[in-house]
Image (cartoon, helix red, strand yellow):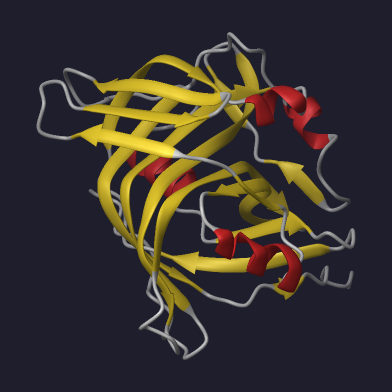
């Protein structure tokens, strides 16, 4: 049995879409209590049962946008590097991801910053990959943030914290709902869709993500839990984000 993803919602004129090249999810195991301190009321870490006890996961998701555009303005497209910093959470019982922030290597970062109040910043980002080499190689250089990884000799048969491939593909690669702290202090929400990933499994020779270090979630020498990567992936982004309203108690 393989994970087939989720149904694709109808496209709307105000949505955005993009092709992602050299896409990678670099994940770290973290202490659930430390992660919980950064989440709003009603949000909780999605805890996993690892071989040595309970834990939670955060990920740096890095890729190159190619042909990012709003559907109503296809003639204006951008290409640049991007890194999303996220944690796997539940919000009032619903699964998704909490976004700590995003780095974008393009002046258009001002739109999500100021129009939608999103925690985005501009950074220089360089992502390189050679998918034809043996082993395939992937690297990220974004100032103090960096990662160098190479493909494993064999696909993973087990990933600590998950029941099997179907489980980690659904929970680690396919969250479609995300929340973030707006610049005005309130919580925003948005959703995306992409086909089910068919990732390749890499191991990091070195990695460092200061965003997670500043949050007190990892140390500079903490090794990644996993690196899942794919040469290209289509994304629909259901813009604009909305103000999150917590469901009322019955």
Q: Position of residue 181 (x, y in %)?
A: 79, 55
Specify whether 89 is left or right of 108.
right
Specify whether 222 is left or right of 207.
right
Q: Quadrant of residue 36?
A: top right
Q: Quadrant of residue 195?
A: bottom left
Task: Tell me what residue is drawn at x 52 percent, y 40 percent.
Answer: 124
Q: Nearer the viewer, residue 5 or 117?
A: 117
Q: Nearer the viewer, residue 239 or 170?
A: 239
Q: Nearer the viewer, residue 83 or 24?
A: 83
Q: Nearer the viewer, residue 245 or 104?
A: 104
Above/below status of 66 relative to 221 = below
Specify whether 68 is left or right of 43.
left
Above/below status of 230 relative to 217 = below
Above/below status of 109 relative to 77 = above
Q: Position of residue 37 (x, y in %)?
A: 85, 34
Above/below status of 249 relative to 25 = below
Specify whether 187 is left or right of 147.
right
Task: Tell me what residue is drawn at x 27 percent, y 25 percent.
Answer: 156
Task: Tell me what residue is drawn at x 73 percent, y 28 percent.
Answer: 32
Q: Position of residue 238 (x, y in %)?
A: 53, 75
Task: Tell me what residue is drawn at x 66 percent, y 73 percent.
Answer: 241
Figure label count: 0
Considering the image in quadrants, where does the C terminus appear?
bottom right
Q: Position of residue 58 (x, y in %)?
A: 60, 34
């Amino acid at each position: 049995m393989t994970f087939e993803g989720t149904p694709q919602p109808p496209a709307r004129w105000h949505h955005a879409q993009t092709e992602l090249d050299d896409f990678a999810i670099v994940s770290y195991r973290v202490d659930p209590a430390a992660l919980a301190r950064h989440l709003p009321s009603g949000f909780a870490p999605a805890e996993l049962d690892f071989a040595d006890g309970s834990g939670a996961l955060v990920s740096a998701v890095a890729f190159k946008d190619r042909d990012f555009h709003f559907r109503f303005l296809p003639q204006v497209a951008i290409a640049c590097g991007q890194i999303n910093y996220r944690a796997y959470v539940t919000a009032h019982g619903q699964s998704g991801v909490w976004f700590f922030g995003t780095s974008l290597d393009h002046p258009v970062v001002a739109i999500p910053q100021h129009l939608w109040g999103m925690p985005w910043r501009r950074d220089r980002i360089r992502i390189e990959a050679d998918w034809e080499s043996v082993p395939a190689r992937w690297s990220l250089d974004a100032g103090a943030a960096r990662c160098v990884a190479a493909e494993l000799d064999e696909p993973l048969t087990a990933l600590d914290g998950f029941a099997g491939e179907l489980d980690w593909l659904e929970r680690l690669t396919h969250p479609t709902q995300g929340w973030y702290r707006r610049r005005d202090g309130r919580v925003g929400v948005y959703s995306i869709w992409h086909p089910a990933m068919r990732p390749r499994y890499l191991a990091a020779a070195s990695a460092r993500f200061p965003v997670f270090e500043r949050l007190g979630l990892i140390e500079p020498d903490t090794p990644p839990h996993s690196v899942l990567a794919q040469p290209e992936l289509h994304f629909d982004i259901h813009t604009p984000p909305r103000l999150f309203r917590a469901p009322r108690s019955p």
